[in-house]
Amino acid sequence: MGFDQYHEPAQELPAETRTFARLCASLTEEAEAIGWYEQRLAVEPDRQARAIMRDAQGEEFKHFAMDLEFLLRRTPLWREIAQGILFQEGDIVEHGEEAEEEAVEEAAAEGAPVVGSVSLGIGSLKGAQR
Amino acid sequence: MSHLLRGLAPISDAGWEVIDEEARQRLAPALAARKLVDFAGPHGWQRSATNLGRTDGLAGSPAEGVEAKQRRVLSLVELRAPFDVSRAELRDADRGALDVDLAALDQAAHRIAVAENVAVFQGFEQAGITGLVRASPHDSIALGEDCERYPRHVAKAVDVLLGAGIEGPYGLALSPDAHTRVLETSEHGGYPLLDHLRKILGGPLVWAPGVEGGAVASLRGGDFLFDSGQDLSIGYDSHDADAVQLYVEESFSFRVATPEAAVALTP
């Protein structure tokens, strides 16, 4: 039985970090499985077998997405960078650079007004009023 | 650099902090619509339209035996309120002045908050936005000036919503005049009218500049949808030796999914 997801001694890690590491490992496994199914589908000639593998790959898509959402919820900076990249049209690298710059700036400011940010960060006020 | 071109403005980091904070403080109390409706996004400046999930049939088709439909979308509207900031005042802000004159920013923030409120409550026909007040199929209720009768009017609105199967909690948006009257009034026995109204609604009462009369709306979610492209932001336009020309800007669409979920209150 391996504990490869831990890079540091597990007994020294807080419970939250161990959970985080487990989900990171799970995310990796789901991504690997998606890649494996993609390869199998590319070479499998039997139509029914392909249908089954396509269905199985769909499960891995779901698992990957759930793992990722869990990790993003636990990591606001990661989430913010991801929000600038995921489901956006246009140049992925450009979005990545912009999202990282803005999110890191904001984190560095630790709640202070964000110099150079693209919005005032007002968003929804539902539930904020008296 | 984003389209706001903030990096080109002759404004220090400290100056931007002062401007942004002032804008937040002025905008938040006046943005009544955001206190009652669902907010999605912000999706960014490049978002152009909201998916309505609907199609229009097309008379023609590129080829025989093929049907064609066109997706219907709601285009986002851009609102921009320009204002000037004195460069002398900005230099004072850099020196640590706490009483920087940002009156023009305050006015611009109020103008754009009013515009947003009007679009959401009354509507903005040119932009294809039907406000929740206009969309309501229920008879409107006249508020009048006797605000001791407001609990009765609000309770009637809540009854109408319940009768239509619309669950609470409910929120009440009131024009500034009506809101002031509520704050100033205690009922018999000294019980604040504000608290009484909140108890009837199970939700908040919000100050809604730009709104005529008001509205009672369900807060259960899924009924009123504000789709934000670029959320409220300060951008740079130009400058001269004396002043910097800036603007407050946003893009959004608004649609009503359940017209029955609001009751209009007329002045």
Image (cartoon, coloured by chain):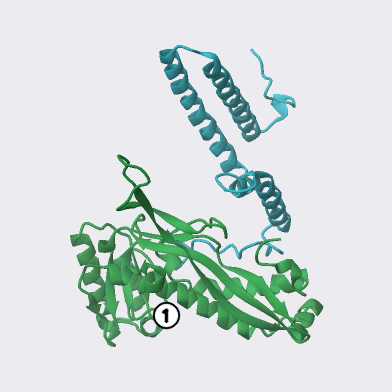
Up-down relation of residue A53 to residue A129 (above or below): above
- A116 and A4: which is toward the camera: A116
Q: Within the image, what quadrant is residue B158 found in? A: bottom left
Q: Secondary structure at mark 1?
A: loop
Residue at the front extreme of this rendering: B64
Residue occupied by mark 1: B210
Up-down relation of residue B191 to residue B251 (above or below): below
Tell me where residue B11 appears, x and y as whole percent: 76, 74
Colour of chain A, in one word, is cyan
Q: Chain of mark 1?
A: B
For the colour green, the matching chain is B
Residue type, numbered disc 1: Gly
| Total number of numbered discs in the rendering | 1
Residue at the right extreme of this rendering: B95
Tell me where residue B53 appears, x and y as whole percent: 36, 50
Q: Within the image, what quadrant is residue A111 found in? A: bottom right
Please name the residue shown 52% across and 61% down the image.
A123
Tell me where residue B214 appears, x and y as whole percent: 33, 76
Please name the residue shown 23% across and 63% down the image.
B161
Please name the residue shown 65% across and 71% down the image.
B235
Q: In which quadrant of the rendered image does the N terminus of chain A lie?
A: top right
Let me know if residue B124 appears in the view.
Answer: no
Tell me where residue A80 appears, x and y as whole percent: 62, 49
Let me know if residue B218 appears in the view.
Answer: yes
Q: In which quadrant of the rendered image does the C terminus of chain A lie?
A: bottom left
